[in-house]
């Protein structure tokens, strides 16, 4: 009994929380760096960038798009927006994994209380919590990654330029009553411009983080039973494998929401006079490609998310072992 109490106190201590967050932040940065070029290509496909729609939908198209970016801008082109990604991912991953550790401990203080529903809830809550604190940086990242010569013939914008552009976005076309109302809201609350697509992100984060951590906890409970002996402790290969399966399951469950979110996030470029609504965005995607439009780039998503999630979970677990948490 006393050992359970001390474990609870340790997990809720500031030292434990900081170490858990540090392990998660480092894991997120390493994982994102591994897949940064694919992430750039996927954003261009999802947001319907006119330069790259001819390549959308296949792995070979993704590689051809990546090759075109590389020939035009070199390695910097493939990593465009990555500095903002890292600036966002470290606090995002740190908060997500730290929150998961804490929520998991509250909902499931012992092995007997672990259920798939509670695993899902712990993952979903931790994912939503991290998004609340880091979402504007996600919009910056998407805007920087979306920028190509056809979309904007000026030089690649910096983070400060992207901030200025989003903050001062306004319509250059005749406005409807709906657009005028949106403009008034943006004028009164310009911070809302940095939260385009936020509702789609939250709705998509629930199945993504929920399924990801549900799969992670469930598969570990089956294939990596808790044991104190050294020879039966989890290995990096086990962490990578279970993380990969978890990433594939999460991506499948949440991908349509991700496509909607990307389209809404670049709405300031496509329609600066409007706050693109869910219904309008869904209709536009459906009219362009029917149901397939909600899965454009999914194969690339697997190619990106599976290794990213595998590396993220494995480094997170490795970091926790190194840091003693």
Image: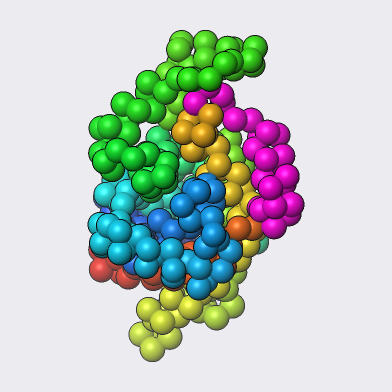
The structure residue drawn at horizontal position 58% and vertical position 49%, both measured from the top left corner, is 259
Rendering coords of residue 299 (x, y %): 57, 67
Closer to us: 131 or 172: 172
Residues in magenta, as a range: 272-294
Say which residue appears at 46% left-offset and 10% top-offset: 188
Between 293 and 278, the residue placed more toward the observer is 293
Which residue of the protein is positioned furthest toward the bottom in this rendering?
231
Q: Is residue 34 visible?
A: yes
Q: Is residue 9 above or below residue 167?
A: below
Left or right: where does residue 57 sit relative to residue 239?
right
Q: Residue at x 40, y 56 (%)?
A: 40
Q: Residue at x 56, y 69 (%)?
A: 58
x then y, percent, for residue 314: 39, 70
User: Which quadrant holds the C terminus?
Assistant: bottom left
- The spot of residue 6 in percent (x, y) is 37, 56
Residue 155 drawn above or below residue 7: above
Count of numbered badges drawn on the protein: 0
Nearer to us in this view, 111 or 131: 131
Dominant SS of magenta comes to helix
71 displayed left or right of 176:
left
> Quadrant of residue 74 in the image?
bottom left
Residue 207 visible from this viewpoint? no
């Amino acid at each position: 009994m006393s050992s359970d109490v001390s474990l609870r106190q340790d997990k809720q201590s500031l030292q434990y929380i900081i170490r858990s967050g540090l392990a998660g932040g480092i894991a997120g940065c390493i994982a994102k760096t591994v897949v940064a070029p694919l992430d750039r290509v996927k954003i261009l496909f999802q947001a319907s960038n006119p330069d790259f729609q001819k390549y959308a939908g296949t792995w070979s198209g993704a590689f051809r798009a990546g090759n075109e970016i590389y020939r035009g801008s070199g390695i910097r082109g493939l990593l465009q927006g990555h500095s903002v990604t890292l600036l966002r991912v470290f606090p995002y991953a740190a908060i997500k994994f730290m929150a998961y550790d804490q929520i998991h401990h509250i909902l499931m203080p012992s092995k007997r209380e672990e259920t798939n529903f509670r695993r899902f809830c712990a993952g979903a809550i931790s994912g939503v919590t991290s998004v609340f604190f880091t979402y504007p940086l996600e919009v910056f990242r998407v805007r920087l990654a979306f920028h190509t010569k056809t979309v904007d013939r000026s030089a690649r914008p910096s983070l400060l330029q992207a901030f200025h552009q989003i903050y001062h976005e306004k319509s250059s076309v005749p406005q409807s009553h709906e657009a005028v109302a949106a403009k008034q809201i943006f004028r009164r609350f310009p911070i809302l411009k940095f939260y385009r697509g936020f509702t789609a992100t939250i709705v998509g984060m629930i199945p993504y983080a929920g399924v990801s951590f549900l799969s992670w906890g469930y598969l570990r409970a089956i294939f990596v039973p808790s044991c104190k002996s050294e020879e039966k402790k989890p290995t990096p290969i086990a962490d990578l494998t279970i993380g990969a399966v978890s990433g594939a399951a999460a991506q499948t469950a949440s991908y349509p929401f991700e496509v909607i979110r990307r389209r809404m996030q670049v709405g300031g470029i496509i329609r600066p006079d409007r706050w693109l609504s869910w219904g309008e965005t869904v209709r536009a995607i459906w009219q362009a490609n029917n149901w397939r439009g909600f899965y454009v780039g999914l194969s690339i998503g697997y190619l990106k998310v599976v290794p990213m999630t595998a590396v993220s979970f494995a480094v997170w677990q490795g970091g926790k072992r190194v840091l003693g948490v």
